[in-house]
Every structure is written in structure tokens, then in C-alpha cells.
Amino acid sequence: MPDADTGPPGPWRRDPAGSAAGISEIQFAAPSALIRIREDQAKLRGFIRQITSRPLPEDTALSVGGEGGSRTSVRQAFQDGRARMTLLFWLCAFVMLMGFYFLAFWTPTLLGLAGLPASQAILGTAALNLGGVLCGLGVGKVADRFGGRVVLSGMFVMGAASLGMASASTGSVVLLMVAIFLAGAAWIAGQALIVVVLAQSYPAQIRATVIGSTLAVGRLGAIVSPMVASVPMALGWSPEAILLIPIVPALIAAAAVLFARPVDPATSSR
């Protein structure tokens, strides 16, 4: 949650000795787009007004930090006590994408086992994406209330539970659809939430690099997913049994995200 003294987390900070209006100075750790207008107070005010829909007090001074063209590297995500946090976030992203593609791959097969004609299997895909959309609309507010890491951990637990429910519900189309809907809420909305938690956990200067590298590791999970499924398929496992494979990694990730914090809490904004 935003600190009462330092203001909201993000690319600006409020002077603790703020004016009566609430904000006396805003410092941007800014992208190159702001570097180019760093000396133009009017343009900077217009930029903030577009974000907040509120004008700033006239006595608020704006300054842009950083230099255009500065480079960042993934190595910085492992510095200043952030190595453990970065590795745990990578694990979470890997599991998130692996679990989602497991479900996406097996949904038509499970619907067929439940007795739904192949022509109606599209309903399963619709339920999966509907769950992701509806949950995605509200997950941000829930994360603001209870904390992003706690909610993301809960998403992993719900994702594991949805896979177990889907595996056990092949005898009922209704229960299977409910399981698929919940799985979409967990595995799709969770992908959006992990980006939010990443943005809150790293300094603005390396935020984009960290998010990009973490999502790249997540894509490895998507690639590995069918490979992992192919071995039990070759051994003759049933689809219901194969769908249970990501449950243990999901529960591990649920615990890991709670410990994904820098060694020095001062290096993270949340």
C-alpha cells in the first residue's frame, strides 16, 4: 500500500515535508519520453494530469531524474539483495505459463470425456477466457486491499485446485465448465497480476528489464508444458491424471511468491 509519508509507489516520490496542498515536489525516474520535456514544467504538468485526471497545485516543483539512453541489464535484478527475489519470481512465471498451457491443451479432451460434442468444445475455451477476463477486472483492487503477493499466492492455490477439480469432473459438463472458469480466473488473471507485483518490487530504472526477463522465463514454461505432458502420454496415462501434474509446482510457487522479497526491504517499494 502507498506509504503515508512518501506517496504512491511508482515513477515519482513526494517530499516528506510536503506543502499544505499535499505535494511540494515530484521527482520522476522517467523514460526517455519525459527526458525530452524535462525542462518544460507545463508539459510535465499536462502529462501528470493525463494520468491522474487532476491538476497539480501551482507550487509543486517537477524534476526528471535519469539520463536518456541509459542502459540496464538483467544482472541488475540480482544486485542489492534482489537475487533470491528475482529467482523466485522467475519460478512463479514459469509455473504460471506451464499451468495455463496444460489446461488450454487438455480442455477439448476433457470436454470430450465429459460427453460434450467436439462442435461444442469452443464453450470450454470461452469459459476459460471469460474467467480470466472477469477476474482480471477485479484482481487489481483485491491486490491493493490485501497485497499483491498474498493475492498472487492465492491465485496459484486456486489454479492448483481448479486443475484437480477439472480432472475429477469429467463425468459432469457443468462441474467441468465451472472448473475451467475458475482455472481461467487463476491462470490468466494471474499472469497480469504477476506483472503488477513485479512493478511494485523493483526500482523504476530496472522495472521494464525485470518484467521482460521474467515473462521470457514464463514463456519457457509454455514451451516445456507439452514436453512434460508427452512423457506420461507415451506411458499411457489418462488425460485426467496428466492434468494433475502442474498441481505440485503450483503449490510450490504459491509459497515461493510469499518469500519473493529483497534481502534489504528498502530496495523494494512493497
Image: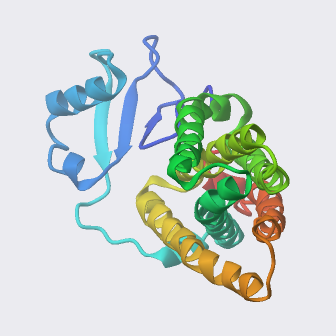
Look at 73% across and 37% down and name the residue there. Answer: 174
In the picture, measured across the screen, residue 104 lies left or right of residue 62, that is right
Identified at 73% across, 88% down, the residue is 234
Image location of residue 14, percent across then percent down: 47, 31
Judge whether 171 appears above or below 245 on screen: above
Give me the residue at 70% from left, 61% from top.
262
| Residue 200 vertical position relative to residue 241 in the rendered view, above or below | above
Color theme of the render: rainbow
The answer to which of 126 and 3 lies nearer the viewer is: 126
Tell me which corner region of the image, top left, top right, bottom left or bottom right, holds residue 202. bottom right
145 left or right, relative to 128 = right
Q: Position of residue 242 (x, y in %)?
A: 77, 71
Q: Depth check: 192 or 34 in front?
A: 192
Answer yes or no: is residue 132 visible.
yes
Q: Position of residue 35 (x, y in %)?
A: 21, 51
Residue 235 horizontal/vertical position (percent): 79, 88
Residue 123 in the image: above or below residue 69: above
Q: Is residue 161 above or below residue 260?
A: above
Residue 1 visible in the picture: no
Residue at left 58%, top 34%?
140
Looking at the rendered image, the quarter that the N terminus falls into is top right
Is 147 in front, or is 41?
A: 147
Task: Tell me if 10 is positioned left or right of 101 in this view.
Answer: left
Q: Nearer the viewer, residue 168 or 218?
A: 168
